[in-house]
Image (tube, helix red, strand yellow):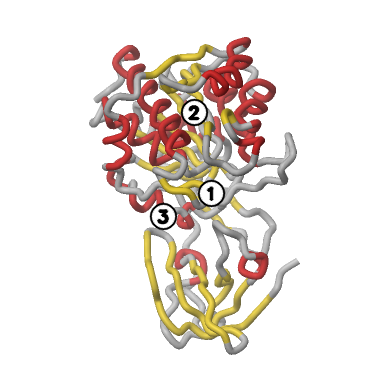
Amino acid sequence: MIRWREGKVIQRLREWRGAVELTVEVDARQVRALAYPAVVGEPVIGDRVLLNTNALDLGLGTGGYAIVVAIPDRLPPDPVFEGHIVKSRYSPLQTVVLSVDEENSPCRPIMERASHLAGMPVVTADLHSALPAVVAGIHADAPHARIAYVMTDGGALPAGFSRNLDALADHLVGTVTTGQSWGGDLEAVTVHSGLLAARHVLAADIAVVTQGPGNLGTGTTWGFSGIAVGEAVNAAGVLEGRPVGSLRISEADPRARHRGLSHHSLTAYQKVALVPAELAVPEGLKPHVLEGIAPLAQRHTLVTVATDGLDDALRKSPVTHSTMGRGLDDDYLYFLAAAAAGRHAASLIAENGQEK
């Protein structure tokens, strides 16, 4: 169900690659709204807009915007379809993209030959907020490493929703949107084809796989979109990559199930991931945290990672770190663990002979 509203654009606010934030007057009040110009065209002050207010009315923390569905009095020109892959399939806003491996793609010959990752490290994390910290950890030791981001469809579907990606543009060789997600530099149908595109089309040394911002969770063991991190481990392993797991660790989360090692990391790596990964464990963790991580050693390799220099790398990131409304110093261990995974992945590049 959708709560439909009609509004008028009062102001254009922040803009980043793929999205525009607006102030829109709706029912005699002003609200924040978000438009994706690739879908609805460029909104201008004075436009009448049709809105989906579901997220706004629910008060969602990450995505509490009214979403512009159409600018009905000034529709954008018809697109020229280069591809025929439909994402957000059969929803009112289904969009057509050119998938990296479909027949019309100039990358099709490369993708037809691509069958494995040649040992490329693949960092997996369950939250989008880990991405900037992982990148910081990689570039702390391997500043010239070519990093590709493979975005799954567990959170936001439009890549343009992520301000992290806009800020990291100069630190990534590209974004591959997979599944129902769209708007990356490359489009792929599955995480598997997305990883192959990262390695063979973008020539990445390392791929980082997370969902987009705005994860979905119910507070239950299995009702969380981020446990698909285990499936990403499986994909990397099947394709002969080297899965490197970023653990979700926190000393600040008010919910007991997320303090120490999050129960979601335990579920994803212990029950969903069926192939072994190298799980990065930052040095100096307290005994009770290590005790929570220990069961993962039954299937995976626990790698203790030195943390010297990671604080500086995190603070130099072009992204203002934030997870669940908590900044770097509010939930320091969470970001440090993600950076440690990046550092470990960077150590594998030279071993694999990949860094350009």
Classify mark 2: residues with Cα within 10 Å, few (<14), some (14-19) or many (20+). many
Classify mark 1: residues with Cα within 10 Å, few (<14), some (14-19) or many (20+).
few
Residue at the image point whose x is 38% and y is 21% from the top? 344
**Residue 77 picture location, percent across and down:** 47, 73
Numbered circles on residues, count: 3
Give how far across and how far down residue 18 sits, in percent.
42, 60
In the image, what residue type sits under mark 2?
Answer: Ser
Residue type, mark 1 in image: Met
| Badge nearest the viewer, 2 or 3 | 2
Report helix, strand or loop for mark 1.
loop
Left/right placement of residue 295 relative to residue 290 reads right
**Mark 2 in CB contact with mark 3 (< 8 angstroms):** no
Identify the mark at residue 246; answer none if there is no mark: 2
Image quadrant for the N terminus? Answer: bottom right
Identify the element where label 2 is drawn: strand
Q: How far across and how far down the image is residue 226, in percent?
A: 61, 38
Q: Which mark is residue 163?
A: 3
Q: CA distance from mark 1 to mark 3?
A: 15 Å
Residue ID for mark 1: 324
